Structure formats: C-alpha cells, structure tokens
Amino acid sequence: MPPLTSAQFSLTLRVRIDHRPEMLGRVATAIADAGGTIGDMPADALGRMAPGAIVFAMANPTPEATPEEAAPYARVIATGRSDYPNQINNVLCFPGILRGALDVRAREITEAMKMAAAEGIAAIVGDDELREDYVIPSAFNRDVAPAVADAVAREARRTGWAEASADGFGYAEGDTSEFRPVPS
C-alpha cells in the first residue's frame, strides 16, 4: 500500500456511525463497511469492515482484538498496551491539558479544548514520519506535553474561556496571597 498521509488518516478517522437504536448490542452489524472502529468490537467482526480500516482496541491490559487478530483486516492498529506500536495512553493528554488550562486560567476544560489537545498530539507526528505503526507519539516523547499545553491555551483564548489577558500567562499577581511554602 502507498504511504499513509496525515490527510488520509484524518479523513478515515472522521468516519462516524450514527447512533441507531436497532444497532444497539450488534457491534458486528454497526461496523460493517466502516473505515475504522474505536473500542468494543469482537475480533471476528473486523472482517466486515472496509479494507484498510483503522482499529483502536483500547481495553487494557487485554484489548478487544489483539493486533495479531486485527492485522488481516486493518491498516492501522492501536491499543492501550505499551508492548505494541501506537500505544494510546491518557498520559499523552493530561499534563498538557492541565498546563494549558492553568497557563491561561481557564475555569473549565471544554470539549473544544480536548479536541485541540488531540490535534496537538497528532501534530507531533510529521508527515515524513507518519506510517501505519507510528500514528501516535510515544508517551515518552518530551514534545507532547508542551504541544498539548499550547494547543489548549490557544483554544481557551480563542473561545473566551481564558481569564488571563492576551499577553498574560499563569496566575494573576493577586493570586499569590494565599500561597504557602511546601515543607521539604
């Protein structure tokens, strides 16, 4: 198969299955011809997906479908496990989301800020690096948290959730009155 571009990957991930009550409990039917799935799917249903699909089997430590089971049906496979490529771990999000929100004194973390965090994570993997076994940066990549923080702070400012001034950063001067030293 030709190399995967970030645009192709993004378009494939935007495949959406509308909630349909008649499909409830019938994952195998719901994912038929889908370009990808995230989460709960039986391994034997993967063969019904579109060729070259994306599978994010997130259960940890035992994914719903192992990479070995998904390999015949999927082009991109990710799990929550560190012993396979494309580990999806919440550690990619949280330091950066919190840092970004704190930096601009956002009083709420919105869905838009979470999407900005995801875009910040995705931006770490450049088009020249993107391949089927590397669509998500490592949890140990030191560029992730700052990229996520910047993306979240920008989104908070863009959407009006930032309480810090446009050139302000972090806490306001008056916020330090209740600070106390932490004993060592």
Image: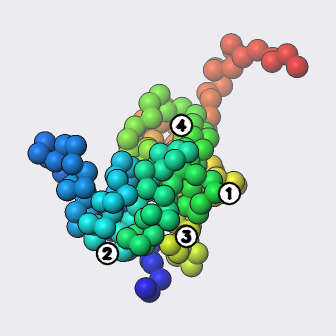
**164 up-or-down from 60: above or below:** above
Q: Where is mark 1, residue-wise?
A: 141
Residue 47 position, x and y percent, is 31, 67
Residue 173 position, x and y percent, is 66, 25
- In whole angstroms, how far apart are the C-alphas of marks 3 and 2? 17 Å
**Disc nearer the start of the sequence (4/3):** 4
> Helix, strand or loop at disc 4?
helix
Q: Amino acid at mark 3?
A: Asp
**Disc nearer the start of the sequence (1/2):** 2
Image side of residue 151 versus residue 84, left or right: left
Q: Residues within 10 Å of mark 2 (few under 14, many from 20)?
A: some
Residue 5 position, x and y percent, is 44, 77
Disc marking residue 101: 4
- In whole angstroms, how far apart are the C-alphas of marks 3 and 1? 16 Å
Q: Amino acid at mark 2?
A: Pro
Residue at point 39% right, 65% down?
A: 54
